[in-house]
Image (cartoon, rainbow, N blue to C red):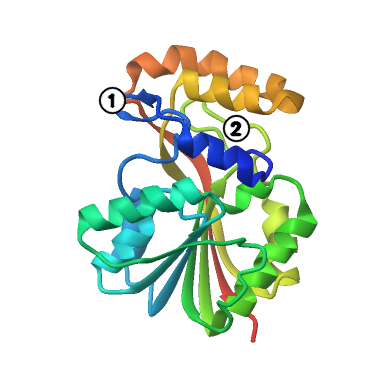
Amino acid sequence: MNVPVDPSRFEEMYRDEQTAHGLPTATPWDIGGPQPVIRQLVALGAVKGDVLDPGTGPGHHAIHYASKGYSATGIDASPTAIQRARQNAEAAGVSVDFQVADATVLEGLENRFDTVVDSAFYHTFSTDTELQKSYLRALHRATKPGARLFMFEFSTHNVNGLSFPLAIPEDNFREILPAGGWDLTYLGPTTYQSNISVDAIQAMAAANPDISENFEPLLERLRIIEPLLTDGIAHLPFWQVHATRID
């Protein structure tokens, strides 16, 4: 979710065994399968060749690519996330190259991928523009000429009363993508599903005491909305971003 990057923090979140609505509480982006926007991207034929899933987490998206016949690689800084992803791939009966790796470096993965799909990962870099640039440059090094980059990140919009602190402003993509070697070809609003709960957001706020007060408006709304959700799944305001590698 939209918190400053700290690999140890994410490792702790993936180790948490609490559940809400039958899904992990501490990792509310894990909805037990691929996001609808990712399934749509694949169905439209936008995903091609060797695919990289940075910040793979439970691995559902990399597993979906593999199930459709693509060569998929999923990386994450959290060893527990990678362990969970490997278990999910085994249960799905597909082969995915899951690795513990630093996405801002991507050492050993140079000139390899035709498609990168960043699903709710870039926004974890918060407002650290230098880290964002390092990440996008690493993706440029890891991809082949003509590669496509698709991103789904927290937006500044409001969906059914839900908005998130530290969402990525539109200008960020317009400035940072070219600096990282990518030509922005599309930017627009979409939604992303989350196994969201008051407990999950309270835990997130507690893990980020310096910005905990920013979560209060969201918690206020969520206390009203959560009982109305089906299986705890809410649609959150996201950006959909398309970019092409500058060769």
At label 1, counting other C-alpha atoms closer than 10 Å, the crowd grade (few under 14, some 14-19, many 20 or more) is: few
- Tag 1: amino acid: Thr
Image location of residue 37, percent across then percent down = 38, 53
Give residue 140's quadrant in the image. bottom right
Q: Which quarter of the rendering shows the N terminus?
A: top right
> Would residue 237 appear left or right of 73 to someone viewing this image?
right
Give residue 179's quadrant in the image. bottom right
Give residue 109's quadrant in the image. bottom right
Is residue 122 shown above or below 15? below
Image location of residue 198, percent across then percent down = 48, 18
- Tag 2: amino acid: Phe
Image location of residue 200, percent across then percent down = 49, 25
In this orientation, which residue lies closer to the viewer: 218 or 32? 32
| Residue under label 2 | 164
At label 2, counting other C-alpha atoms closer than 10 Å, the crowd grade (few under 14, some 14-19, many 20 or more) is: many
Q: Is residue 113 visible?
A: yes
Image location of residue 116, percent across then percent down = 49, 68
Secondary structure beneath label 1: loop
| Residue under label 1 | 230
* Residue drawn at (42%, 17%) of the image: 225
> Would residue 131 appear left or right of 112 to someone viewing this image?
right
Q: What's the mark number on residue 219?
A: none
Secondary structure beneath label 2: loop
* Residue drawn at (55%, 17%) of the image: 219
Q: CA distance from mark 2 to mark 1?
A: 21 Å
Toward the right, the furthest residue is: 130
